[in-house]
Amino acid sequence: MLERGGIKIAVVSLTPQSAIKENGVSISEPIGTAEKTLAPLLKDVDLVVALSQLGNAQDQELAKRLPAAHIIVGSDLSMVTENPFWYDKAILVDSQAFGYLLGRLDLDLAFPFKGFFNNEEIALTQKRIKEMEARVASGKADEGLASRLTRTKQTSQLGPQLGGSEYRHQHIKLTKEKYGKKNELTQAIAKEKERVRREALKE
């Protein structure tokens, strides 16, 4: 549990059962365990963040079974989500593996929570869908385009959310030139590390 600016945030981490195979050590079924763990907390929190190592397919299942999760931060080695995926009111973000990209998600939260929106992304998605629909209708599209069109409609925001919370999402490329140099996040991260250290030492 965290509290920032008066907003109470529950953070839960999910690891696949196959992650540890040591004798005497076992991992409970992650999604069911997360459901049970969060249930008594939900009445006292404003935002739920799930940090998932389960992979994209399981993250979709997580969004269905744990509708209380507002944000799912994935870690699928086989994919990068340039823009968040949508599963009902939850959004899934997933940066590239091995630290090549730093994902950043900024939120302007509005309560009671009614969902997230990003007007720029809505406009781009609507344009992309129209282009895909035109290609499918022309009969000249490849076999996979129709399924990609369906998936886009299912996992993208297609219209504005009245009373929703606006988000902005970006990937920061950690190139050789940029890696290790100070950026706008460096100072904030350093302050947070120091706060956690002092709290642990009760200074």
Image: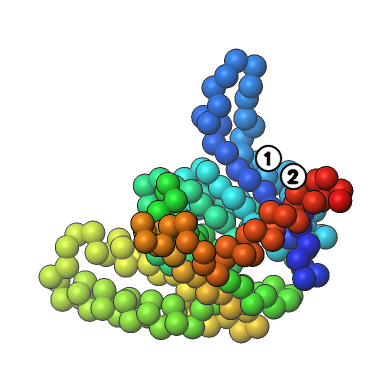
**Is residue 38 toward the left or the right of residue 171 in the image?**
right
Residue 138, percent from left and from top: 15, 76
| Marker disc for residue 57 | none
Residue 176, percent from left and from top: 36, 57
The residue at 44%/65% (across/down) is 171
Relative vertical location of residue 70 with respect to residue 138 in this rendering, above or below? above
**Is residue 8 toward the left or the right of residue 152 in the image?**
right
Q: Which residue position holds label 2?
A: 37
Residue type highlighted by circle 2: Thr
The residue at 40%/69% (across/down) is 153
Q: Which residue position holds label 1?
A: 33
Residue 24 occupies which quadrant of the picture?
Answer: top right
Between residue 88 and residue 167, name the one nearer to us.
Answer: 167
Q: Is residue 88 visible?
A: no
Crowd band around label 2 with a 10 angstrom C-alpha radius: few (<14), some (14–19), many (20+): few
**Is residue 201 toward the left or the right of residue 47 in the image?**
right
Between residue 87 and residue 98, name the one nearer to us.
Answer: 98
Seen as rendered, the residue at the extreme right is 202
Residue 102, percent from left and from top: 47, 59
- Point out the image quarter for the N terminus: bottom right
Between residue 102 and residue 137, name the one nearer to us.
Answer: 102
Residue type highlighted by circle 1: Thr
The residue at 55%/70% (across/down) is 184
**Helix, strand or loop at disc 2?**
helix
**Is residue 14 toward the left or the right of residue 135 in the image?**
right
Look at the numbered discs 2 and 1 and tell me whether their residues touch, using CB distance below 8 Å.
yes
Crowd band around label 1 with a 10 angstrom C-alpha radius: few (<14), some (14–19), many (20+): few
Label 2, label 1: how far apart the Cα atoms are:
6 Å
**Helix, strand or loop at disc 1?**
helix
